[in-house]
Every structure is written in structure tokens, then in C-alpha cells.
Image: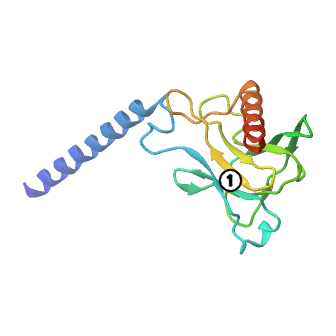
Amino acid sequence: MRITRSLVSRAALGAMMVVGLVAVTAATKGTTPRTAMFGGPWLSIETPANPYLASGDGALFLVRTYVHQTPAELPVAGRAEGIVDGKRRSVPFTLAKTTQPGAYVVRPEWGGKGIWTVLVTAMPEATNSWKMQAVVDVGADGAIEKVTLPRAANRAPRALTDAEVEDWLRARVKATVAVGAH
């Protein structure tokens, strides 16, 4: 009798776990990475770059990508948008992989002159809310001024549109001129 109850209890517990897993899957289907129970891809910027990372020589910053809190290799793309001597420039660049999983080096391939906004996009080909972007403002002195991860109204990570990038950059240039004016 005791064995029968134990087997019935285990079967009931197993059935509850399966039902719970199905409920969690159904509840998170179609939700954003922020609301999904187990998380999703993520992107972070590390600055200053770790000087002990051999492949990080000359790095302005490191990009780290994660899935479910674990470092993971994700497709990444980089583009620097700037204004140099009053002229608009766009410079795509390659993020160099490091020896660490999910870690990439960004070197200032766009040059040292001008005001730049660097866009690093994880999963650039994605058409859903898993595409995310870090917006890194680099000052005229080459130092990182600010890092932003744009979000949609539902708090899901997103990438800036070309028009938003243009407005962002123009606002930065106006702010620099206003601060520098006497």
C-alpha cells in the first residue's frame, strides 16, 4: 500500500510539473525578453576595457553578449556615426572576437577627430524584439561620455532608426557648441 501511494504521489507531482512548465511556456510566448521568466539575449558595454585581456590592446571598449545570463556568441555589427569638421560621416566597423566567449573588442577605426555616436547591434538581422543596440557616445577627446540601450514602449530592447540616430547626433553637436560658446 505504501509503495502504491508513493508512486501515485510521484506521478501527480510529475503531472503538476509538466502542467506548470506548459503554463509558463504559454504565458511567456510572444512576450518581450524583459517579461519572459527565463530572460533572453543581452548586450553590455565594458569600459574601460580590461587591460589584462591580451586581445584588447587599443580597445575603446568591450562588448559582451549573453543569453540567459551566460556569456554567448551572438552576431554583432558596429557602425560609428559622426560629424567631423561639420560633415556627416558613417563608418561601419568590425568587432574583434576575444578569447572569452561572447566578448568583442571595439577599436576606434573611425579616427580621433569629431563627435561620434557608436552603434553596436546584437542580432542585427533579427526582425523581432530580440534585436538590441547599445548607443555609445564618444566625445571629441575620444572618451566615452554615455552608454544607452534604447527600449520600446513595452520596455523591450530595440535599435534606433536612422532618423533617430541623425537627431541624436545633431543634438549632441548642438550641446557641444552650446557648452563651448562663451
Give the percent coordinates (x, y) of residue 85: 92, 40
| Residue 78 shows in the view | no
Q: Compared to 48, does 162 lie above or below?
A: above
Residue 33 shown left or right of residue 45 in the figure: left
Q: Compared to 63, does 117 lie above or below?
A: above
Under tag 1, what secondary structure? loop
Of all residues, the one furthest to the front in this rendering is 182
The residue shown at (58%, 45%) is 41
Of all residues, the one furthest to the left in this rendering is 1
Q: Quadrant of the N terminus?
A: bottom left
The residue shown at (62%, 33%) is 158
| Residue 149 shows in the view | yes
Give the percent coordinates (x, y) of residue 71: 60, 57
Q: Quadrant of residue 38?
A: top left
Q: Compared to 38, does 27 lie above or below?
A: above
**Front residue (pair 5, 138):** 138
- The type of residue carrying mark 1 is Glu
**Front residue (pair 77, 171):** 171
Give the percent coordinates (x, y) of residue 102: 67, 57
Q: Compared to 146, does 26 lie above or below?
A: above
Q: Quadrant of the C terminus?
A: top right
Residue 3 shown left or right of residue 121 in the figure: left
Provide the residue designation for mark 1.
Answer: 73
